[in-house]
Image (cartoon, rainbow, N blue to C red):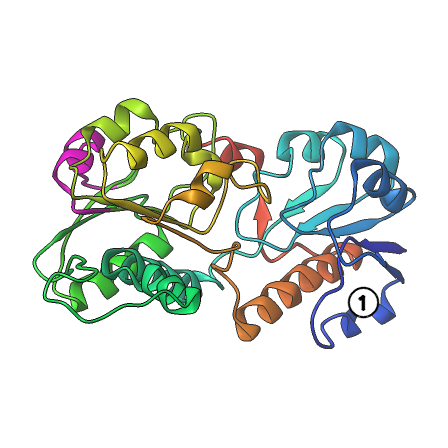
Amino acid sequence: MNIFITRALPGDVLTPLSGVGTVTVSPHARPLTPAELRAGVAGADAVITTLNDRVGQEVLTAAGPQLRVVANTATGYDNLDVAAITAHGAVATNTPGVLVEATADLTMALMLDVTRRVSEGDRLIRSGEPWAWDIGFLLGAGLQGRRLGVVGMGSIGRAVAARALAFGMEVVHHSRRGISTGLDELLSTSDVVSLHCPLTSETRHLIDEAALRLMKPTAYLVNTARGPVVDEAALVRALRTGQIAGAALDVYEDEPRVHPDLLTLENVVLTPHLGSATTETRTLMAAIAVENVVAVLTGGDPLTPVLPAVAERP
């Protein structure tokens, strides 16, 4: 069996693969180019990918008919053409559930940062510019008594809601499952809007110019879901004109590229896709991807398969 891994994985998580097949790990400490990915997967029975790797028909053809599993080291799978992988005779897997607490923690960190202007204050101190305490200096907004609108009430959305309640916030949500608030109502009444929905054809640019116009001029947008859920050009316009008060983003529409105008705005907090970035979480994600590969290549069922019908659901 040949197993190709597109990026080095942490710790000793690869050990279970030693008895299954020959393991090749990309030598590059960066995302592979499409050509490098096609070359790397050639002849592979299993591929372990990260969210940077787009696996569609070209990659599957390059891999060959013996490919049995594409194990994505991520909860999301919008980088995988799940229907094409299934039609190829392989199975797609992901790593759901393990990054819930880490991502919820980061969401609250971003929420506090942008509303209390923490990074803005840090930049001021580091600039060396003179400053002095004043009664109106760098005033932000408190969270107590404010409304949080959670878009996507899955496991991460629920974990964020629990944290927000501890901060004294009121929580409403919009979700495809269960009782929820209409999206327009959520956008127009929330003081903070936090995005936790998957990226699908229906959620791409869910937060566009029209959606941003509905938000309060005192409201903040937080995105730790997927970058293309937000129309970044529309967000820049809304931030520049004071249509909303601020935004905190961990994911980007054309990642790793960030809309250049976002870099110039003081009312924006930007982090480089750190939602799952704890040692414990990233190691467990990698371990689950490896377990999925071992299960499939030894004739068993994967722990966390992604089915085409689920992948297409908004």
Task: Let me know if residue 117 appears in the view.
Answer: yes
Residue 147 in percent (x, y) is at 13, 50
Q: Residues within 10 Å of mark 1 (few under 14, many from 20)?
A: some
**Element at badge 1?**
helix
In the depicted structure, whether residue 289 falls above or below residue 56:
below
The segment highlighted magenta reads: 178-192
Instruction: Say what amino acid the circle numbered 1 marks.
Output: Leu
Task: From the viewer's side, name the closer residue of 116 and 175.
Answer: 116
Is residue 189 inside the magenta stretch?
A: yes
Residue 72 place in picture, x, y as percent: 65, 50
- The x and y percentages for residue 3 are 84, 55
Front one among 2 and 278: 278
Residue extending farthest front? 130
Q: Is residue 3 left or right of residue 284?
A: right
- What is the total number of numbered labels drawn onto the structure image? 1
Which residue is the site of mark 1?
17
> Can residue 314 be seen in the rendering of this structure?
no
Q: Residue 299 sits in which quadrant?
A: bottom right
